[in-house]
Amino acid sequence: MALASSEPGIVTADPRIAPAVEAVAEQGFAIVPDAIPLSLCRDLIAALERVEREHAHGFGQTTFEGTRTVRIYNLLRYGAPFTDVPVAEPVFSIAEQVLGEDLLLSSLSAITLAPGQEAQALHSDSQLISLRRPHPCLMLNAFWALTDFTEANGATRIVPGSHKNPKPPKYGETYETIPAEAPAGSIILFDSQPWHGGGENRTEQRRWAISNYYCAGWVRQQENPFLSLSAETVRGFSPALQDLCGYKLYRGLYGHVEGQDPRAVLTGEPGRPNVWQQADSSA
Ligand SMILES: O=C(O)CCC(=O)C(=O)O
């Protein structure tokens, strides 16, 4: 939980957390301004430019991913500064409150809209999951606006309140949306159900964003960190990031390795007790 100190000796919860959690529940989305230092936005853009160049990432090959959009998946593979993103406050605490403890990182990817990118089809992130809508929040996308998000450069389009709609949108259909306009350094949060999609980029500049996507600890991650990141890479992460990648048991049970804490198997350090050990020690 993110703590902020307003007066010497007094520590309070970050005042941005509760309103954001409430807005996600009420409207399906929230915008947190000034959540990312602008120097970090610049560092992330420079790192994305480098990765794009060195690894020859090009435009998407499908309409949904965007044929004028550069998507770079599995950003944790490239180390800092990307490794700072999933654990950054206050967004980590907001995600924890929305999704519960033992939450996971579902994916971390860059979505860079180049000039000429058309609007993406509206969709709901949980539409492939066969649960009756509206359902509890399964995933929370924390979209890092590294440059200004404007209507003209393709700010994500959202149908407010659609997280309560019992149906997902019809693919390819047009609906009334609002652009999630926000200055660089803002984080746009939306839960798994609202109807949304990337906007059209009619400007001459790129819209830079990182999709920092969390899910509840009992939901399958979109990216598979156990194969897309080597054990050696994950050993270099902070314990909090290792946990988010899935090297932690959900409720002391799910994800165990022959009964053991997966982080202990990864690092050789002592493991946290599983649910059966906890029950014995509290008996
Ligand atoms: O780029 C955006 O603004 C939204 C992208 C999105 O929703 C997606 O690719 O699932």
Image (cartoon, rainbow, N blue to C red):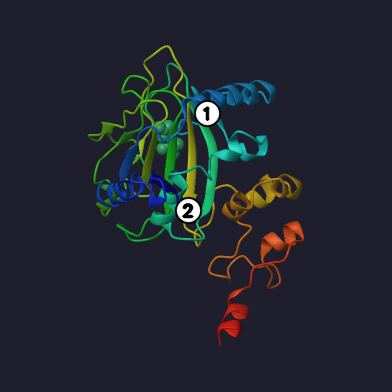
Q: In which quadrant of the rendered image does the C terminus lie?
A: bottom right
- The answer to whether residue 204 is seen in the rendering is yes
- x then y, percent, for residue 77: 66, 38
Residue 86 horizontal side relative to residue 30, left or right = right
- x then y, percent, for residue 93: 44, 50
Q: Is residue 200 above or below residue 274?
A: above
Amino acid type of the residue tagged 1 in the rendering: Leu
- Which residue appears at 53% of the width and 69% of the height? 251
Front residue of 117 and 41: 41
Helix, strand or loop for disc 1: helix
Residue extending farthest to the bottom is 283
Q: For the residue carrying disc 2, how many other residues have a C-alpha within 10 Å: few (<14), some (14-19), or many (20+)? A: many
Which disc, if any, is residue 135?
none
Q: For the residue carrying disc 1, how many other residues have a C-alpha within 10 Å: few (<14), some (14-19), or many (20+)? A: some
- x then y, percent, for residue 47: 61, 25
Write down the residue under mark 2. Answer: 215
Does mark 1 have its CB less than 8 Å from ligand 1? no
Write down the residue under mark 1. Answer: 40
Amino acid type of the residue tagged 2 in the rendering: Cys
Residue 178 horizontal side relative to residue 230, left or right = left
Residue 242 horizontal side relative to residue 173, left or right = right
Q: Specify which label sits upstream in the sequence, 1 or 2.
A: 1
Q: Quarter containing ligand 1?
A: top left
- Which residue appears at 58% of the width and 76% of the height? 275
Residue extending farthest to the top is 204
- Tell me how far mark 1 sits from mark 2, CA to CA: 24 Å
Helix, strand or loop for disc 2: strand
- Which residue appears at 24% of the width and 46% of the height? 161
- Which residue appears at 60% of the width and 40% of the height? 83
Front residue of 65 and 24: 24
- The answer to whether residue 127 is seen in the rendering is no
Does mark 2 have its CB less than 8 Å from ligand 1? no
